[in-house]
Amino acid sequence: MARRLPNFSSCFALVLTAFVAVSVADMPVALAQEILSEGRSVKARTKIIETFHIGHDDTNFGALTFLGGLELLASDRKIGGLSGLLSLDDGNAFLAVTDNGHWVSGAIKQTTDGKPVDISEIRFTPLLGTDGKTLQARWGHDTEALTLSESGLYVSAETKNAIYHYPWPLITGKERMIGEVNLPDEIRALPRNTGLESLAAAPDDSALTGKLIAIAESSQSDAHDLSGYIVGPNGVERFSIKRSNRFDATDAAFLPDGDLILMERRFNLRDLIGLRLRRIDGAAIKPGAVLEGKVILEADFKYQIDNMEALAVHQNSKGETILTLLSDNNRSILQRTVFLRFRLEE
């Protein structure tokens, strides 16, 4: 769920038997200019973010090396609210989803090491339901995350606590939803403002091949674990992730080796704003498991972060693993759309 910051800073059963998930890096992907061809073009400019730690030149942050960042300023507010992200074409392109039911695509100019230099060719178009109506018209547009598998795109919607299935690639952007994943009542009954926030398709050759991982945003308190779900061809199984230090889950993505990166965000009057990334052993994600993982990055208001909501992983032409982090500005002049790149040092 997008959090607004103050001034100080019907159902279609999914046939999953042929659903074999693969990593985005292993898939043939369309270039930015081949996606959303019938979308509306938007003018935008970017501002370079040279350092992650404000006022410091350090680039090494534990297992991560900061490559660079951008602040995106678009001429249309519909480009705000970016909540889910895919890195495409070795990081030269992206597809995002907004929390008000829009696809957004663009091209990324980058250096040979993956440092983002500019974002251009931005287009957007509304997500359509199976009937061709927009998700806004269907009141199912609180879309928070997306992931790519061999069988298509999957998008989570928090308010409905649904997972939508779309074809891939989105050549025109006018492609209709294929259907909804059949989910149990337990997921449908999650609180509307703390429901399915994170979604990730497991890479090929992992123990979770052919399955999606969905994670709820929050819980009643730090004493209550985050609810996680393994969505596969034989139904849905549950696991848990330890919640701590008032962080909420906002996105997740698998690494090529099968481990899961969980992005978390914190905002409250006590802590102000925060970001955390945890690496969770993919082999440990099993029904009934209670997981904690290892913190590989934590940042607060002294770093170049905002309302961090989207995470994508890709491998570049050198075989390096690149993490891209994106913030949701809630379409507010008080917040920023921040695009950050890190290299994972294995």
Image (cartoon, rainbow, N blue to C red):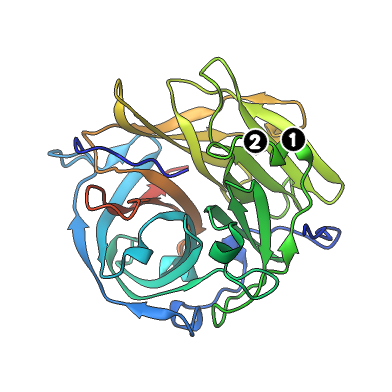
- Dividing the picture into quadrants, the one containing residue 151 is bottom right
Between 20 and 41, the one lying in front of the other is 41
Look at the picture and state if 286 lies above or below 316: above
Q: Residue most toward the top?
A: 223
Residue 319, visible in the rendered structure: no
Looking at the picture, which amino acid does disc 1 mark? Answer: Glu
Say which amino acid is labelled 2: Leu
Q: Is 251 above or below relative to 168?
A: above
Badge 1: few (under 14), some or many (20 or more) residues near its Cα, within 10 Å? Answer: few
Q: Residues within 10 Å of mark 2 (few under 14, many from 20)?
A: many
> What secondary structure is marked by label 2?
loop
Q: How many marks?
A: 2
Question: Is mark 2 in CB contact (under 8 Å) with mark 1?
Answer: yes
Task: Report the disc number at residue 190.
Answer: 2
State the residue in front, 326 or 53: 326
Task: Give the percent coordinates (x, y) of residue 33.
Answer: 44, 82
Give the residue at mark 1: 186
* Residue located at (43% from left, 23% from top): 246
Q: Does residue 301 appear to the left or right of 219 in the view shown?
A: left
| Residue 344 image offset from top left, x and y in percent | 43, 46
